[in-house]
Image: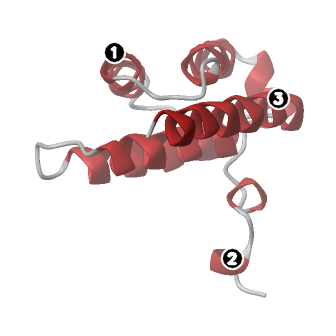
């Protein structure tokens, strides 16, 4: 099984316990918890993540490198689609420790169900 076949949380970019204990890792964890709380990713949350990534440019954490690559890809054309917001949400979800990831996944599924019911 190649790295691309693995679920995102097993590809080696989730926050480790040591990273969570660092000031940068703890700040990223707080930001990601907040951004995933309602199951959706907003323009304001993307701006906050982008700012954190810019401020923590030297962060060598796999989670920061992974998120930076996703955000750069999403912002490349200057236009962000609803599907791209979901891509960022899924990327953020994937770097969370397992307990937070389970909460983020449940919140996303509830938000998706609410969107489907409204449509």
Q: x, y (%) of residue 65?
A: 49, 46
Tell me, yes or no, if residue 61 can be seen here.
no
Looking at the rendered structure, the secondary structure element under dot 2 is helix
Give the quadrant of residue 105. Answer: top right
* Image height of 11 relative to 116, above or below: below
Give the mark nearest the N terminus, 2 or 3. 2
Give left or right: position of 2 versus 18.
left
Q: Distance between the residues labelled 2 and 1?
A: 32 Å
CB-based contact (under 8 Å), mark 2 and mark 1: no
Looking at the rendered structure, the secondary structure element under dot 1 is helix
Q: x, y (%) of residue 99?
A: 88, 30
Q: Kindly identify which residue carries mark 1.
A: 44
- Say the numbered circle drawn on residue 68: none
Label 3 crowd (10 A; few <14 / some 14-19 / many >=20): few
User: Which residue is pictured at 66% across the width and 22% down the height?
Assistant: 25
- Say the numbered circle drawn on residue 3: 2
- Say the numbered circle drawn on residue 18: 3
Q: How far apart are marks 2 and 3 (CA)?
A: 23 Å
Label 1 crowd (10 A; few <14 / some 14-19 / many >=20): few
């Amino acid at each position: 099984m190649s790295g691309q076949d693995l679920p995102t949380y097993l590809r080696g970019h989730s926050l480790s316990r040591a990273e969570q204990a660092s000031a940068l890792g703890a700040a990223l964890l707080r930001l990601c918890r907040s951004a995933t709380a309602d199951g959706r990713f907003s323009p304001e949350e993307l701006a906050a993540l982008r700012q954190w990534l810019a401020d923590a440019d030297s962060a060598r954490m796999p989670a920061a490198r992974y998120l930076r690559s996703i955000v750069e890809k999403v912002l490349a054309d200057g236009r962000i689609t609803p599907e791209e917001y979901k891509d960022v949400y899924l990327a953020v979800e994937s770097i969370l420790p397992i307990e937070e990831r389970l909460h983020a996944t449940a919140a996303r599924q509830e938000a998706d169900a609410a969107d489907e019911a409204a449509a």
